Amino acid sequence: MSPRKCYPTLTDMKQAILANLSPAYPWKDRLFVYPELDSTNTRLKSMASQGAPQGTVLIADRQTGGRGRLGRTFLSPAGVGVYLSILLRPDCRPMELMHLTCAAAAAMCRALESAAGIRPGIKWTNDLVWGKRKLAGILTEMGLNAAGNVDWAIVGIGVNCCQAEADFDPEIRDKACSLAMAAGHEIDRARVAAAMLEALREMDASLLTGKEEMLRFYRARCVTLGKEVSIVKGGEVHHGKALDVDEEGALVVRFSDGHTESVSSGEVSVRGMYGYL
Ligand code: BTN
């Protein structure tokens, strides 16, 4: 299989992304594409604290320190993925943004569907999956101002686009997947990035008003619901059944001792009883 579509220079990549954006996309003047960054989230966080505007986007062809949830590493090799972070500045209290990761996951389902013609599932809370394999991960971060309101929110997304199975490290080969593997055809990373930006702009427009509709979509796509799960919290593992995703995006679990509790994504890791899903 030769699934790659490469851009010989990053200027071409940026031009190709811009060419794929609709005329209505409002943040074309604040899109930055780099050959390499440690982490697009980390760099954007420092730009946010220096006053970078809403809609600033960083994309790196490669990350040397890509970060995932719960302090994990997100492997980000050159030429095969989209590693993208966007800065938003919603005017609200932090509690009103508890659903941000869910909103981003729902938006990314729509983006990958339109760019690659596949219908991903969501592993609660922040992974996009194809079958039992991870296609993409999302890391959201937030900063507050002196009044305790949201100053900035950053949504970082890493999508495996062009890898063949053998390109993944042996330890994750049976758990990871790319858009090319899922779709069975070559993937244009610029088209994927543009679809992600359009979906993130739409997400931003309805972030505080469209929560109910977004959660309906999220629940319908969430492959964790109805499954037996292992909840790992502070080194302890508890078993239960995932029943629902609540208004704040927390996972409602009925534990094996019979009690039901909402667990939030900041504190737990969820596994299927027999592996990643
Ligand atoms: C996860 O799998 O837990 C989340 C992975 C998020 C990776 C993306 S890639 C772009 C942005 N920059 C980072 O360092 N992380 C996010």
Image (cartoon, grey):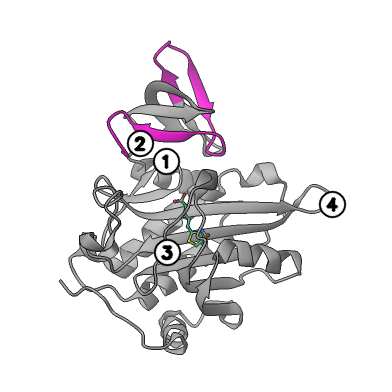
Asked if residue 201 lies in the magenta stretch, the reply is no
Residue 239: mark: none
Left or right side of 223 for 199: right
Snapshot quadrant of residue 159 = bottom left
Q: Which residues are magenta?
A: 253-277
User: Which residue lies under the disc numbered 4?
Assistant: 146
Residue 97: percent from left, percent from top: 62, 47
Q: With respect to residue 67, does 54 lie above or below? A: below
Q: Few, some or many C-alpha atoms within 10 Å of disc 4 (few <14, some 14-19, many ≥20)?
A: few
Q: Is mark 3 within 8 Å of ligand 1?
A: yes
The residue beneath circle 3 is: 76
As drawn, 98 above or below 22 = above
Q: Nearer the viewer, mark 3 or mark 1?
A: 3
Residue receiving disc 2:
224
Disc with the residue nearer the chain's start (1 vs 4) = 1
**Residue type pointed to by label 1:** Trp
Tell me the amino acid under the disc marked 3: Ser
